[in-house]
Image (cartoon, grey):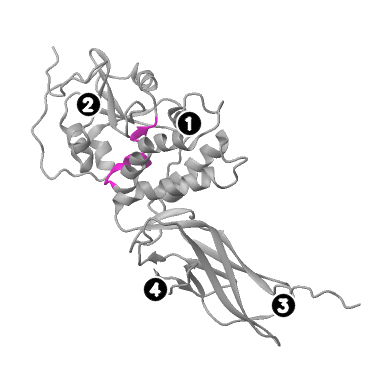
Amino acid sequence: MKNPTLPRPAIACLFLTQHPFPTTVKQFEVIGSPITVRLLQGALSKLAILSPVTINFESGRPDVFGGNQEDLVEGTATFRQLKPLLGTGLRANKIQISLAVQQVQGGTSMLSLLLEAPMIVVTNTKQWEGAQAGLLIEELFYQNVDCSRSYFAFCNLLQKTFVTSVIPGSGFKRALAVAELQFLAHRMDPNFPRISITESVFKQFWSWFGPILHLLKFKKFFLELWNKGLLCGFVSKETAKLMLKDAKKGSFLLRFIASSAKGSLAVAYQHNLGVRHYIFPDAELKEDGFLRFILDCPSLLLFMKMKTEGPGELIIKEDALHQIGYKPKARAKKSEDFLGYDPEIISPFLTSK
């Protein structure tokens, strides 16, 4: 009786030690996070390397990436200049990594690694929110269904998205704190984690959270404000009041409003009448209008800077804006004192009496 035919054992394999996928990237821009590939081979196997390590899409089309070939150095290849040259039409594409090797006294082999975590290449920044939402929905609801909807899995997914997709390779310094993750989970559904996440609930949450991430990723100064703790970000109105309760008059903080349909930015500040609030119009967020407003407003004097422990630190607003490199082109007309809103919005140019 003949022995059954056994598969030929692999002489080596490729594996990733570092990568940002799944993620959404912009056409012609370098993928921010490095991609590190290692060659794993047996202790006694002897291989001749016949090609650089190459990254392409699964389709095999050769002209979709620039900087997609790197030589192995001591068994490792690191891609730092990989950039997509073509958009994917908002479709998710899988990455394939390949390397040609030859075994001493043997034949040639093409080692290949297909990464299940995909990427989407957008051609303009307006597509980013929709593309990123598609990747997250796929991961949250159609992969590892038995566990992916748990509270901890949801928080880990948000953190991973925040760190790897929103601000990769851009001087990232500040991840989401536990309290901020709790705030976001509660913003998505007040009953969470007692109930499971549904796709419709997640889409509603993303319609609020996606625009915030877009601001942090693409709008000038937002990332610097976040990194330096000058954008408190994900705190409730009640928490903001507590943070400013005993602060000096003119102390203020920036936060995103949980009750808005999309991620609106507000300032909470200590006033003669107590802690007041003002929502910045969307038009002021498109450029740097909200920073100019802060600079010129006499009611706002001391930026509250978030700290990992203890109460926030108060910084003179001119010094804080200097820290993020803000230099106004022209000083706007100085606004008068304003009352903000509580419970309703009041014109920011009303004089307090």
Compared to 87, does 346 lie above or below? above
Which quadrant of the view contains residue 221? top left
**Tag on residue 63?**
4
Left or right, 260 with reference to 100: left
What stretch of residues is rendered in magenta?
219-234
Mark 4 vs mark 2: which is more N-terminal?
4
Total residue callouts: 4
Left or right, 47 with reference to 114: right
For mark 3, give the secondary structure. loop
Q: In the image, what residue type sits under mark 2?
A: Leu
- In depth, the one of 201 and 237 nearer the eye is 201
For mark 2, give the secondary structure. loop
Mark 2 vs mark 3: which is more N-terminal?
3
Q: Distance from label 3 to label 1 (Cα)?
A: 50 Å
On-image quarter of the C terminus: top left
Q: In the image, what residue type sits under mark 1?
A: Ala
**Tag on residue 185?**
1
Q: Distance from label 4 to label 1 (Cα)?
A: 41 Å
Q: Distance from label 4 to label 2 (Cα)?
A: 52 Å
Q: In the image, what residue type sits under mark 4?
A: Asp
Residue 322 appears anywhere in the view: yes
Instruction: Name the residue that disc number 2 marks.
Output: 300
Left or right, 292 with reference to 310: left
Q: Distance from label 4 to label 3 (Cα)?
A: 34 Å
Mark 2 vs mark 1: which is more N-terminal?
1
Q: Are marks 3 and 1 in contact (CB under 8 Å)?
A: no
